[in-house]
Amino acid sequence: MADVTVAQFAEVLKVPVEKLISQLDEAGLSVSGAEDTISDDAKLELLTFLRRSHGKKDDPSAAAPKRITLKRKSQNELRLSGAQGRARTVNVEVRRKRTYIKRDVLEEKARKKQEELDQKRKAEEDRVADEQREIEAKRKAAEEEERLRKEQEEKARLEQEQEARRVAEQEAERRRKEEEERQRQEKIRRDREQRAKETRYGRKELHVAKDKSGQRKKRRPKRRALAVNVDSKHGFERPTAPVIREVTIPETLTVSDLANRMAVKSTEVIKIMMGMGAMVTINQMIDQDTAAIVVEEMGHTPKLLKESDVEDKLLASSATEAEELPRAPVVTIMGHVDHGKTSLLDFIRRTKVTEGEAGGITQHIGAYHVETNKGNIAFLDTPGHEAFTAMRARGAQATDIVILVVAADDGVKPQTIEAIQHAKAAEVPIVVAVNKVDLANADPERAKNELAQQEVIPEDWGGDNMFVHVSAKTGEGVDELLDAVLLQSEVLELKAQASGPARGLVIESSLERGRGAVATVLVQSGLLKTGDTVLAGKEFGRVRAMFDAQGNEIKEAGPSIPVAMLGLSGAPDAGDEMMAVENERKAREVANYRESKGRDVKLAQQQAAKLEDVFSQMEDGSRKSVNLLIKADVQGSAEAIRQAMIKMSNEEVAVKVVSSGVGGITATDVNLASTAGAIVLGFNVRADGAARDALKETGVELHYHSIIYEAIDQVKSAISGLLSPEVKEQIVGLAEVKDVFSSPKFGDIAGCMVMEGNVKRGLPIRVLRDNVVIYEGELESLRRFKDDVNEVRSGTECGIGVKNYNDVKPGDQIECFERFEVARTL
Ligand code: GDP
Ligand code: MG
């Protein structure tokens, strides 16, 4: 194309010349005028410029190709010298291809890549920043927590200090009050003595020499001090990771209670127990041992709570600082049979107890309250030393003063002496009632003499005891007797808190149709009200109704007032302590514990009747025959033992076998042994569940043997009096085989559930099938889950490997026992 002028080009382009010129100018191709020529190159450049600046701006590729690929071909001739000197020419064509990529494309790519990288980096940075923010937040939260904890700790510490200070102040206050009270009493006593001296010359006087009262020893029965537990370790404990709690476990508790104590959800506990093979529900009661296992399993430390702990806490919580006020004395009448105890009580009741509005339907509640114009007296109507002794045996002291009844015509008799001994041992002062003075043959002086020999010395002889001559028949001297009792009581300075939670003693109790448990309770301190929650021995409940000795319903009873009370869960024992408590749950806890403990004691008592005892009685000659019931694993053994035992009979002792047979010991066997007074010998057999219950019930003695001559030797040596040290066996644990697994290392492993006691490693074992011993050997391995353990407790699963024995089957029992030698004593 030939060069054209700008004007011509403008015409081609159909644009005004001036515009083209300015456009050329903008494109950097300056021309001087319309007549200037413009080269093709310049045209192209202009075009490119225009395209770029208009319309297809977004498509830079339109302006310039992104990549240009150039192909180039070149041909060379190669001259090669031939093998025989002849030359040859070869044409070589080389094709080259080269691609040129436009720089901005590369730049674009690099930029994109950079952008990508930047983005990634930024994302990474963001992430890191987020993380840091989070860490920072956590740190802040932890700091905050730490601050709160410190604050709380500080608060707890302050509270504790305050509490300690308060307790110390209270203690000081109490001491001060006590001292004041003591001084006041001292003054009263001196005043009284002074008055007594004055009355000597003025008013009528009791025949009892009052000025001797100073000589009477002030005996205050020892009462159990309330243990107020000021626990100084109740501060805030620093939480450490992992938190190992000391979990206190009462005798029995529910699953949810246990969970609470560990601060976990109940489902956690249920899961753990399920893992141990025990299916439990939230509200199920579990025993202390089981709970302890669960606690250990969860990595905490169990702290077994003893009854006394709960009791102490209960006592402490019911101990209040109410003012102590004088109270009426509690009196028991004691003495020899037929000396007139009942008659005396009846006379007092008939003449001194005002009949109630209930119309005189007096019911016997075993205690009553007498009001005289000189003061009140509570009588325990349990003439009989048993009640007194029973209460003393329980460490409970109900009586302040004993009235010793001695018939003037009969003098001191064995039960009189016994009564004196009881009263002295209990440090209870004696007021002597010389009874039946109305009789012609009455000889009060003789009674005095005989009592003096028992160190019950009348005051006019310089002794401590007041003597009153009475007649339960005529009523003579009864008022004087009551006066003497009140005088004695003054010396004792009997006092009790008249308000606050009641504490007292069960005098007697019964179960009555339609009324449930009726307990006669003597309130000793505090105020017992209907609706109170009370704990009495093994029983607890809420006071539904109360009646006094006259059968009147009453709403409350203070110190020294005996009441018949309804509402307890059962009949408590005479001598049981009663107390009103705030917390019914705690009361139930203690009651439950006492109940289970009571069972243990009963069991222990039954077990005290041992074979040794039987044989020692036999030695004494007081028992001439020994009855045996024999059960063995096989007929041969049973017969052999039977023969051997019978042969041991001699002139002094007859050994009788009431029954011998094969198989496990059943309840029928135990009952037969019980009626025949026989001892059960089990030779390689065991008692089944029902039989064990029967054993507990009947107290029948059972001996297990596995070696015939040992069984024979035991009986023989007992008979002949040759008491060699005895090898005793005790079954320490029983496990039931649930499943059997094969282990390459240990052979057959019995997957077991421990049913009773503990299974311990290192102890000998027996395998039982249907209560018959099928193998005796050693425990080779004991595992819980994957771990070797030394001991597995009742209610827990374990794996047991038996040495040299691979025939264990599901349903078998594995018994773990201990052998020890005891020196025999008779
Ligand atoms: P207890 O066994 O100690 O309770 O004595 P009781 O009160 O049952 O009395 C035994 C017997 O002695 C009864 O026949 C009474 O009537 C009689 N008795 C009791 N006290 C007196 C009394 O003071 N004078 C007379 N003459 N007889 C009495
Ligand atoms: Mg009687």
Image (spheres, grey):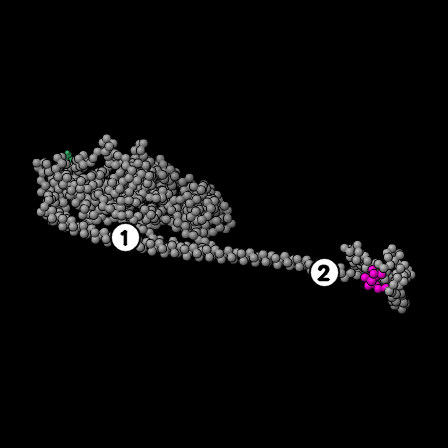
Q: Does residue 6 appear left or right of residue 148 in this picture?
A: right
Q: Residue at x 18, y 50 (%)?
A: 188
Mark 1, residues whose alpha carbon is within 10 Å: few (<14), some, or many (≥20)? Answer: few
Rendered location of residue 733, percent (x, y): 39, 46
Assign ligand 1 to one image quadrant: top left
Rendered location of residue 570, percent (x, y): 32, 37
Instruction: Name the front one of labels 1 and 2.
Output: 1
Q: Does residue 114 appear left or right of residue 742 in this picture?
A: right
Q: Which mark is residue 110?
A: 2
**The residue under label 2 is which amino acid type?**
Ala
Q: CA distance from mark 1 to mark 2?
A: 93 Å
Cβ atoms at labels 1 and 2 below 8 Å apart: no
**Residue 378 visible in the picture:** yes
Question: Could you tell me which secondary element the residue under label 2 belongs to?
Answer: helix
Q: Is mark 1 within 8 Å of ligand 1?
A: no
Image position of 56 with respect to 446: above or below: below
**Residue 775 visible in the picture:** no
Q: Which mark is residue 174?
A: 1
- Name the quadrant containing residue 42: bottom right
**The residue under label 1 is which amino acid type?**
Arg
- Name the quadrant containing residue 605: top left
Q: Does residue 72 appear left or right of residue 575 in this picture?
A: right
Query: In this picture, which residue range is highlighted in magenta?
Result: 20-31
